[in-house]
Image (cartoon, rainbow, N blue to C red):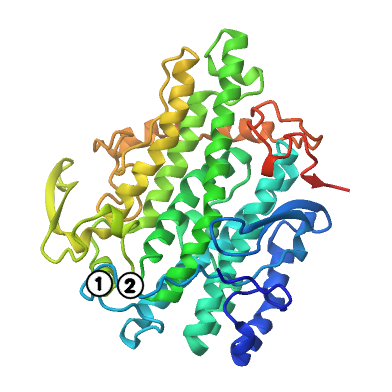
Amino acid sequence: MSAIDYSEKIPNNVNLANDRTLQRALEHWQPRFLDWWREMGPNDFASVDVYLRTAVGVDAQGWAHYGTVKMPDYRWGIFLADPIADRTIGFGDSFGQPVWQQVPGEFRSQFRRLIVTQGDTEPASVEQQHRLGHTCPSLYDLRNLFQINVEEGRHLWAMVYILHAYFGRDGREEAEELLARHSGDVDKPRILGTFNEPILDWLSFFCFCYFTDRDGKFQLKSLAESSFDPLARTCRFMLTEEAHHMFVGETGLGRVVKRTLEVMKETGSDDPQEIRRHGAVDLPLLQRYLSFWFSSSLDLFGSEISSNAATTFASGIKGRPDETTQYQDHVCADSSFELEVPDGKGGVIKDTSPMRNAMNEVLRLSYVKDCEIGLKRWNMQIKRAGYNFELKLPSNRFRRAIGTWANIPTDLEGRPISREEYDSRMPGWLPSASDKDYVKSLMQRVVEPGKMAAWIAPPERGVNNLPVDYEYVRLN
Ligand SMILES: [Fe+2]
Ligand SMILES: [Fe+2]
């Protein structure tokens, strides 16, 4: 395993000290990153002690070291997973040939665009979550938020390293731009829509971690297959950090369901008004939040049929998640993909596309399957408590802004409907203004160790075997 050198100004396991030019360029970017963190990150909590994990190595065993850190002192650095000896290209036209240690000139702009788009989401999420600390439901949750924030900051470092190390002046300019765009900014927004949606409450935060970070997982998984080996190695290590973000989303929403079921049992009622009188999140309200974040995140995968997706697959730039274990045919030169598209007359017809052009959709479908796992678990909780309410993911066609279903009004099941019906039923499908007001009213800060806000159950266990009532964040 390659150890991480923490004696350097920028902790790294890429032998940065041996490349003076690159080291100087990154040391020049570092204070700008810290300025950005101070301005756009959880800056009101800069002086508090947080129980955080930091990477000490990149192997599966003890890569994480836990300790109390003030966030601005967190050691952001450059960590790549260890190289795989004799790794060969796993998909596309060059299947079986050795992987690339440099970016081939002809693919430079495609790689740059993918890396910048991925890199842009990392600081974006920190910006979106910037004020959540003030309304935390517990110290345990506050610590998890900050852990995610520092790791998204590190993911930015991961992409900036690749830009600096392999894309020369263009890369350095893109790295500057990653700090210049801001989530929701009118003039310079973040690149992807979902990353400009405000996250003003913790229910949205958990949905974001569950659905939007999971998009990140799938994008990283497909970039981890890339023939450009340094990118693949960077993404492989990012995925180990990303797993915690999924965990926070899934357990956060599971704890909301658990608390709601307790209140339903206590009151003997499933009437949303009654549940709200007791300060919990009624299940129909939760469903509307899930529908919002899921449908928004679906667009992140791009168009169902895309010549760009075909090129990136054919050239070995971006593969499919778990390419080796999940698929038999890694070239996909003459296979096809069937999908349902709008027929232009308010109906649906079947269409066939070359498989390579449908790679975005292939990725989206494996994402949807992964999203269903949590819902199954929560529905089991609901069923076991004796209720027959079922949380559901809306259809992939619902509320799409990109792709074949963009701007086609459908119901939650994906049936095309009239624009009037769509507009009139929307308040029942997505969070209404009064839903948001209610959720906002729940967002009261709870900071006594071990105490939880009334709308969420405590976690089953604490962090790193510590008790739930451990003081994970020392506020004064
Ligand atoms: Fe990330
Ligand atoms: Fe993440």
Q: Which residue is denoted by mark 1 in the rendering?
A: 311
Quarter of the rendering containing residue 31: bottom right
Ligand 1: quadrant of the figure = bottom right
Residue 455 is left or right of residue 138, and the answer is: left
The answer to which image quadrant residue 113 occupies is: bottom left
Residue drawn at point x = 80 percent, y = 41 percent: 471
- In depth, the one of 153 and 392 nearer the eye is 153
Question: Could you say which is closer to the camera, residue 123 or residue 154?
Answer: 154
Q: Give the image location of residue 188, x and y in percent.
A: 55, 69
274 lies above or below 2 = above
* Circle 1 or circle 2, nearest the eye: 2
Residue at 27% x, 37% y: name it. 414
Tell me the CA gap for discs 1 and 2. Answer: 8 Å
What residue appears at the point 50 percent right and 88 percent down from the top-left corner?
Answer: 168
Which element is circle 1 on?
Answer: helix
Task: Using residue 24 as the reference point, say whether residue 311 is left or right of it.
Answer: left
Residue 246 % position (x, y): 52, 46
At a point 64% along the width and 27% down the height, the residue shown is 457
- Amino acid type for the residue under numbered disc 2: Ile
Looking at mark 1, is its residue's CB closer than 8 Å to ligand 1?
A: no
How many C-alpha atoms fall within 10 Å of the one at disc 2: few (<14), some, or many (≥20)?
many
Mark 2 residue's CB less than 8 Å from ligand 1: no
- Do we see residue 414 in this rendering? yes
- The answer to whether 441 is drawn above or below residue 40 in the figure is above
Residue at mark 2: 317
Q: How many marks?
A: 2
Residue farthest toward the top in the current orientation of the protein:
268
Q: Position of residue 349 (x, y in %)?
A: 12, 44
Amino acid type indicated by mark 1? Thr
Contact (Cβ within 8 Å) of mark 1 with mark 2: yes
Specify the quadrant of the image occupied by residue 206: top right
Q: Residue 25 or 399: which is nearer the viewer?
A: 25
